[in-house]
Image (tube, rainbow, N blue to C red):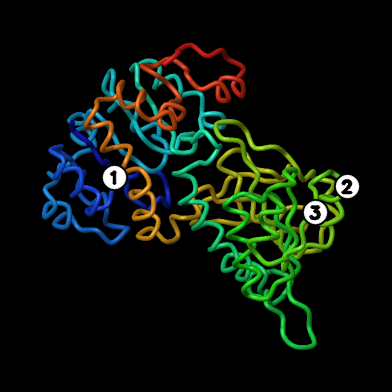
C-alpha cells in the first residue's frame, strides 16, 4: 500500500503526519511512503531522515496526495488541498466535521473519499486511543500556558500558580474528568495549585479522587456548581467533548461576566466548538483575547506547541492502524478493528458517523 505524508498547510501546525521511525515500520512491512519535502521540518525531522528509513521525498503536495492510497495528516485538510484529493482515496487525520466548514464535507463527498477522524476512533469501552495522546500533552501543557497568561506582563491577574508561603496559590477549576482533565489536574496539583474538578460522571470523579489520592476537590457538574466555581476561579480549564459531535456549552456569557477580572479561560474543547459561550478559535501565533474582562485561550492544536513530542506521540498511536490497513486492505481492516471502523466519518464519500450526521442535521448515508 502507498502512504502519503503532505506538509501541513494550516497556520501554526508544526507537527507532521508520520515520524521517520514510523515510516521505517511501514517500509519494513513492505509498503511505500511518499513524504512531501520539508514536511517534518518544524518537528525537527529532515528529508534525509525520511530517506534513510526508505521513504521517497516528493516535491509537491500533488505528488504526496497523488501517489497515495492513504494520506496521513495531522490537521483537517484545508481548502487549498481539496484539489489534490483522488477519487476513492483514504484520508486519515483530525477532522472535527461537526464544526468544520461545510466545504470540507462537500469535497470529501465529491471525490468519494473515505475519511477517518482520529478524534472518532473509539474502542468498545469508550476509550479514544488516538485522542489520549493529544489530551495527555494538552493537559500537561495547561499550567505553563495558564501561568504565562496569569502574569502581569500579559495583562493577567498577577498570580503565581503555585503561590508562596503566606499567599494562596491559584484556584483552578477543571470541567471534565477525562484524560485531558486528569492530566491537567495532576499537573496543576503538582505545582501546588488549588484544583477543583467537575464532571457529570460520578464514577469518573471517583477515579480521579483515587488516582490523585483525594488531593483534588471533586464536584458534580450541575449548573449551580459550575456557576459557583467559575465565579472564583483564577483559571478555568474546559475539556468536555463528545467524539464526533459538538462540545456542550457549559459556561454562559453571564457566568463569564461574574468571573474574576483578568482570570484565564483555557477552552481546550475548542476543536469541537468549545464549552464557553464567549470562546472562539484562535491560533498559536495570536492565541488569546480578552472578552468580558476575562482572558480566553482557545487554540485547537495545543500539542503543536511541542511539535516533535506531538508528532512522535500521534504517530505511535496511529501506526498499528496503518499497519493493519496495509496488511489487510481497507475493508478488511474495518472488519478486524471495530475501533477503526467507528472512526470512519465518510465512506466512499457518504456520511457514515451517526454523531456527526446528527450534529449536521443530516442522515447517515453509508453502513460499513
Q: Residues within 10 Å of mark 3 (few under 14, many from 20)?
A: some
Mark with earlier residue (1, 3): 1
Q: Residues within 10 Å of mark 2 (few under 14, many from 20)?
A: few
Check the image and name the residue furthest to the bottom.
165
Residue at 28 percent across and 18 percent down: it is 87
Q: Examine the rendered structure and indicate whether residue 218 appears above or below residue 87.
A: below
Q: Residues within 10 Å of mark 1 (few under 14, many from 20)?
A: many
Q: Examine the rendered structure and indicate whether residue 148 appears above or below residue 239.
A: below
Q: Give coordinates of residue 303: x percent, y percent.
A: 46, 55
Marks 3 and 2 sit apart, C-alpha to C-alpha, by: 11 Å
Q: In terms of depth relative to the viewer, which is nearer, 9 or 70?
A: 70
Q: Residue 219's mark?
A: 3
Q: Which residue is mark 1?
A: 7
Q: Is residue 182 left or right of residue 168?
A: left
Mark with earlier residue (3, 2): 3
Q: In terms of depth relative to the viewer, which is nearer, 281 or 243?
A: 243
Marks 2 and 1 sit apart, C-alpha to C-alpha, by: 46 Å
Task: Kindly indicate the quadrant of the structure image that contains residue 68.
Answer: top left
Q: Is residue 241 left or right of residue 16?
A: right
Task: Kindly indicate the quadrant of the structure image that contains residue 33.
Answer: top left
Mark 2 vs mark 1, foreground winner is 2
Q: Residue 224's mark?
A: 2
Q: Secondary structure at mark 3?
A: strand
Task: Kindly indicate the quadrant of the structure image that contains residue 330.
Answer: top left
Quarter of the image with the C terminus is top left
Mark 1 vs mark 3, foreground winner is 3
Amino acid at each position: 500500500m502507498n502512504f502519503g505524508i503532505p506538509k501541513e498547510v494550516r497556520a501554526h501546525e508544526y507537527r507532521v503526519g508520520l515520524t521517520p521511525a514510523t515510516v521505517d515500520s511501514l517500509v519494513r512491512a513492505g509498503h511505500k511512503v511518499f513524504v512531501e519535502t520539508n514536511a517534518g521540518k518544524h518537528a525537527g525531522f529532515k528529508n534525509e531522515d525520511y530517506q534513510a528509513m526508505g521513504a521517497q521525498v516528493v516535491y509537491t503536495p500533488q505528488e504526496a496526495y497523488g501517489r497515495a492510497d492513504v494520506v496521513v495528516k495531522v490537521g483537517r485538510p484545508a481548502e487549498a488541498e481539496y484539489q489534490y484529493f483522488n477519487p476513492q482515496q483514504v484520508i486519515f487525520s483530525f477532522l472535527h466535521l461537526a464544526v468544520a466548514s461545510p466545504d470540507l464535507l462537500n469535497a470529501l463527498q465529491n471525490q468519494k473519499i473515505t475519511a477517518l477522524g482520529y478524534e472518532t476512533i473509539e474502542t468498545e469501552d469508550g476509550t479514544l486511543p488516538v485522542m489520549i495522546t493529544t489530551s495527555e500533552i494538552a493537559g500537561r501543557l495547561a499550567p505553563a500556558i495558564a501561568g504565562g497568561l496569569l502574569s502581569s506582563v500579559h495583562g493577567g491577574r498577577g498570580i503565581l500558580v503555585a503561590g508562596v508561603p503566606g499567599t494562596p496559590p491559584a484556584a483552578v477549576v477543571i470541567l471534565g474528568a477525562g484524560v485531558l482533565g486528569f492530566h491537567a489536574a495532576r499537573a496543576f496539583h503538582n505545582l501546588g495549585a488549588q484544583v477543583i474538578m467537575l464532571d457529570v460522571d460520578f464514577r469518573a470523579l471517583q477515579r480521579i479522587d483515587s488516582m490523585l489520592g483525594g488531593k483534588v476537590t471533586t464536584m458534580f457538574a450541575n449548573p449551580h456548581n459550575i456557576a459557583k466555581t467559575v465565579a472564583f476561579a483564577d483559571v478555568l480549564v474546559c475539556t468536555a467533548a463528545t467524539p464526533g459531535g459538538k462540545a456542550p456549552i457549559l459556561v454562559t456569557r453571564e457566568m463569564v461576566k461574574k468571573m474574576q477580572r483578568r482570570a484565564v479561560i483555557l477552552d481546550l474543547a475548542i476543536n469541537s466548538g468549545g464549552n464557553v459561550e464567549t470562546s472562539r478559535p484562535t491560533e498559536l501565533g495570536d492565541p488569546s483575547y480578552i472578552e468580558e474582562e476575562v482572558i480566553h485561550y482557545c487554540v485547537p492544536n495545543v500539542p503543536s506547541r511541542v511539535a516533535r513530542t506531538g508528532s512522535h506521540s500521534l504517530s505511535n498511536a496511529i501506526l498499528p492502524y496503518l499497519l493493519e490497513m496495509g496488511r489487510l486492505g481497507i475493508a478488511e481492516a474495518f472488519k478486524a478493528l471495530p475501533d477503526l471502523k467507528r472512526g470512519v466519518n465518510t465512506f466512499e464519500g457518504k456520511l457514515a458517523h451517526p454523531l456527526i450526521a446528527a450534529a449536521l442535521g443530516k442522515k447517515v448515508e453509508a453502513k460499513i
